């Protein structure tokens, strides 16, 4: 009995779907412009964004030059149909196009916001290329500048902070990657230090700066340790500089003890270098003798 009931239900749903598809296909082939517009609105109200989008996309170019209001709404709803289906790259384009075409529309502000919000939604995970994230931040800031009193302003500010957090994490992972893959590799240790310096300039208030400040001490010590003798003194002095900066800003950090070990080892290395420099100077003989000049003779008059 259950199997029979299930079979009837499945048959009914299949018939319903096929009938709906047949009805939609007939509308696409034989419907008038007005019928397609009205049907697209009905599909949109029912949250059937797929069929609504197909119709809006078809009729939008046909409405231009005929009914200005319908052309405006068709473009606006078509952008939303793409957004609702997570076609964010297309929706950001359509919303921006709507804004540029209908700047006096009651939906202009919302369209510019949705353009920026679509870019935000299209921003990838932090471990991927962040070019589109930068584009989204610029678009959100542009919206705030264009509509400083907008109800969307506060939300845009929050979205910008969220995207900047993503950029922070991307840069943080990049800095750590140099450090983690720099086993006995002087180039990578140098890159780790440079990357951390750049990171702290770009994100001075980042929550990752405490750990990175410690890693900079670590990487700089290992860089100095692997350097040629003529470079070591300067690079060990940089270890001191980075350690003191770390200790000054994070005196209670959980990394203090580890940093102190690098600092203490650095003092021993510098003492050895200074002793070697002193011994080298003492080994050079000092020339205290005076230069003698040949005596000049005055010719006698014959």
Image (cartoon, rainbow, N blue to C red):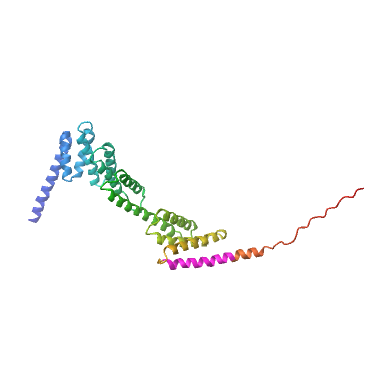
- In the picture, the quarter occupied by the N terminus is bottom left
Q: Is residue 294 shown left or right of residue 151?
A: right
Please report the residue visible at 33 percent of the width from the left and 53 percent of the height from the top. Answer: 161
User: Percent from the top left, x then y, of residue 200?
Assistant: 42, 56
* Residue furthest left as drawn: 1
User: Is residue 102 positioned above or below 169 on the image?
Assistant: above
Task: Locate residue 161 relative to residue 189 in the image: left or right.
Answer: left
- The residue depicted at 52 percent of the width and 61 percent of the height is 237
Asked which quadrant contains residue 64, the reply is top left
What main secondary structure does the magenta stretch of the protein show?
A: helix
**Closest to the observer: 290 or 130?**
290
Q: Is residue 67 above or below residue 223?
A: above
Magenta residue check for 258: yes
Q: Report the magenta residues as a range.
A: 255-274
Horizontal and vertical percent position of residue 48: 18, 45
Of residues 286 and 21, the one nearer the viewer is 286
Q: Quadrant of residue 111?
A: top left
Please identify the quarter of the rendering in which residue 79 is found: top left
């Amino acid at each position: 009995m259950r199997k029979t009931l299930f079979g009837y239900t499945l048959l009914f749903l299949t018939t319903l779907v096929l009938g709906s598809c047949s009805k939609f296909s007939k509308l696409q082939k034989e419907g008038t412009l007005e019928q397609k517009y009205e049907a697209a609105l009905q599909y949109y109200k029912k949250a059937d964004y797929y069929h609504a989008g197909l119709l809006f996309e078809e009729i939008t170019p046909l409405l231009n030059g005929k009914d200005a209001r319908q052309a405006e709404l068709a473009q606006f709803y078509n952008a939303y149909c793409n957004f609702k289906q997570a076609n964010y790259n297309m929706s950001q384009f359509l919303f921006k196009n709507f804004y540029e075409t209908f700047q006096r529309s009651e939906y202009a502000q919302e369209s510019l916001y949705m353009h920026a919000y679509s870019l935000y939604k299209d921003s990838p995970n932090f471990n991927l290329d962040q070019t589109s994230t930068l584009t989204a931040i610029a678009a959100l800031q542009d919206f705030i500048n264009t509509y400083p009193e907008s109800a969307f302003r506060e939300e845009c500010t929050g979205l910008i902070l969220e995207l900047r957090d993503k950029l922070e994490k991307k840069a943080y992972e990049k800095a750590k990657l140099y450090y983690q893959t720099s086993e006995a590799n002087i180039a990578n240790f140098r890159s780790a230090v440079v990357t951390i310096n750049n990171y702290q300039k770009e994100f001075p208030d980042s929550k990752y700066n405490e750990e990175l400040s410690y890693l900079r001490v670590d990487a700089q010590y290992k860089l100095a340790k692997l350097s040629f003798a003529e470079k070591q003194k300067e690079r060990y002095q940089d270890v001191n500089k980075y350690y003191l900066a770390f200790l000054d800003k994070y005196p209670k950090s959980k990394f203090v003890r580890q940093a102190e070990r690098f600092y203490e080892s650095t003092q021993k290395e510098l003492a050895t270098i200074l002793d070697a420099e002193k011994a080298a100077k003492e080994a050079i003989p000092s020339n205290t003798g005076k230069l003698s000049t040949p005596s000049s003779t005055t010719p006698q008059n014959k």
